[in-house]
Image: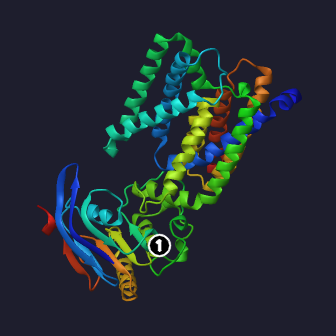
Amino acid sequence: METIITFYWPNIIAGILLVFTLGLFGRHLVGRNQSMEIMLLGQEFKTSILIASILATIIESGEHTEHSIHLETIVALLCVAFFHFCYYRLIKKRAYKIEGAIVFITILIALDHLIVLFSPLVEFHMIKSALGDIVTVSKVESFFVIVSTILIALFYNFRKKEFNKDTLEIALFNKRTKKSNDYYFFNLSVMFLMLVSIHLFGTIFTVGALIIPALITSYFNLSTQKFNALNCLNSLMVIVSFMILTLHDRLPSTVIIIILITITSIAYSFMRSQRK
Amino acid sequence: MIKLKGVSIKIDGEQILSNIDLSIEPSDIIHISGDNGSGKTTLIESILGLNNFANGEIIKDFDLDDYGYLPQVSHQNPKIYLELKDICDTHYSFYPESFARKKWHLSSGGERKKALIAKAITESKKLLILDEPFNHLDRETTSQVTQYLEELSRKGLAIIYIGHSSTIAGSKNVEVSKWRQ
C-alpha cells in the first residue's frame, strides 16, 4: 500500500480533487434539471473522441501517446460543440428536452458502433472514453488536473453566491430573472471539467461524479451543508478504490470509484435523513 | 424609465402583439391585464431583455441590479434543498422572521409566494415586476403586500404587475388585447 501511494500520489490527489469539484458543480446541474443534458454531453464527448481518434490515425503518421493533449482534443471539442449546437437547434420545445436528449444519445451510441465497425483500431478508444483509468494517467496529466481543479474550485467559491442564485431561479421558475455572465462562466467551467475528466477518467466516472451524489442528496432532502460533507467523504473514496486495487488489480479503477460513491451517498443520505 | 415605441412581438413567425406604445415612469403602478395566452408575460420579458421576440424601440433606464422580477412559479418541487431564508433573508410585515427556517418542501403555496415576493422587492431599486403575485395569498396578506407596494411606489419605485384584477390602488390598467391583431 505504501508503494502504491508513493508512486501514485499525484493520481490519487487528482482523483480526489476532481471528484470534489465535479460534485460541487453537479449539485447545481441537478438543481437546474440538467442531469439528462449532462448524460448527453458525456455521450457527445465519447463519440467526439472516437471521431477525433479516426482523424488522428488518418492525419498523423507514427504513434502518438495515448493521453497527450493535442489536435485530437481540439477536434473532439469542436465535435462536441457541433453536436450540442444541433441538439439546441433541433429541440426547441422545452417540454421535449429530455426525450430529445434520449434520441440524441441513442443515435450517438449507434454512431459509436458504426465507427468501430469501419475502423476496429479505435475500439480501444471507445472503451477508454467510457471507462478511463486513473492508474494510467501520467504525472504531467495528474498535475494538470490538480492545478485546474484547484483554480476552478477557487473560482466556484468566489462566484458561488451568483451560481446559487441562478440555480434557485432555474429550479423554481425554469428561467433566470436576470441575464448575467455568471451563467456562461458556470457552463464553461462545467465543459472544461468534463473535457479534462472524460479525456483522462472516462464518461462513467465524470457523469457519475457530477450527478449521483447530488441526485441522491436531493432525493433525501439533505441540506447544502450535509451535501458538502458528503462531497468530502466521496472524494476520499478515491483512496479506498486504490486500496481495493491493491487486492484486485484487474478491476477498472473508475468504475470502483463510482460504485463506492453511490454506496456512500445512499448510506450517508439515508442515515442523515433518519436523524432529523 | 421605460419607453416602448411601435414595438411588436413575434414568436416562431407568428405576430402576437403589434404597435405597442407604452411609457412607464418612476412611481407608476401599471396593471397589465388580458386573457390567458394574450402575451402579458412575453411582453414583460421582452422589456427585461429575457427573450428575443420584440422588434421596435425599447428604451430602458435601468440595468440588472435595478430591478426585481417575480415570474410565475413553475416548479413546486425543485431538486435542491431550500429553506425560505435561502430565497430571501430580508423580512417584511407580510414575511416575518419566523418564516426564516421553514423548509420549502414543507411550506404552503402562500408561504412560498410570500418569500418570493419579498425576494423580488429586496432586489428592486428602480423597478419591480410581479407576475400574478396575489395567487395563493390570503386576504390579509394580499392587503399587507398591496399596502407595502403602494408605499414603495410613493417613494419612487415603478411597479408593473400582471393579474386578472386590479388590486393596487392608483394603478393604471393596460389591456394587452388592444395590441393583438
Q: Residue at x 55, y 20 (%)?
A: A56
Q: Residue furthest bottom?
A: B154
Q: Is residue A237 visible?
A: no
> What is the quadrant of residue A139 in the picture?
top right
Residue carrying label 1: B123
Chain holding disc 1: B
Relative image position of residue A35 (x, y in whole percent): 49, 41
Describe residue B103's horizontal placement relative to residue A11 as left or right.
Answer: left
Q: Between residue B167 and residue A19, name the one nearer to us.
A: A19
- Bin the neighbour count of mark 1 within 10 Å (Cα to Cα): few under 14, some 14-19, many 20 and up: some
Residue A169 in view, yes or no: yes
Horizontally, residue B1 falls left or right of residue A162, namely left
Vertical position of residue A48 compared to residue A58: above or below: below
At 44% from the left and 55% from the top, the residue drawn is A170
**Residue B109 place in picture, x, y as percent:** 40, 64
- Quarter of the picture containing the N terminus of chain A is top right
Direction from residue A137 to residue A71 in the image, left or right = left
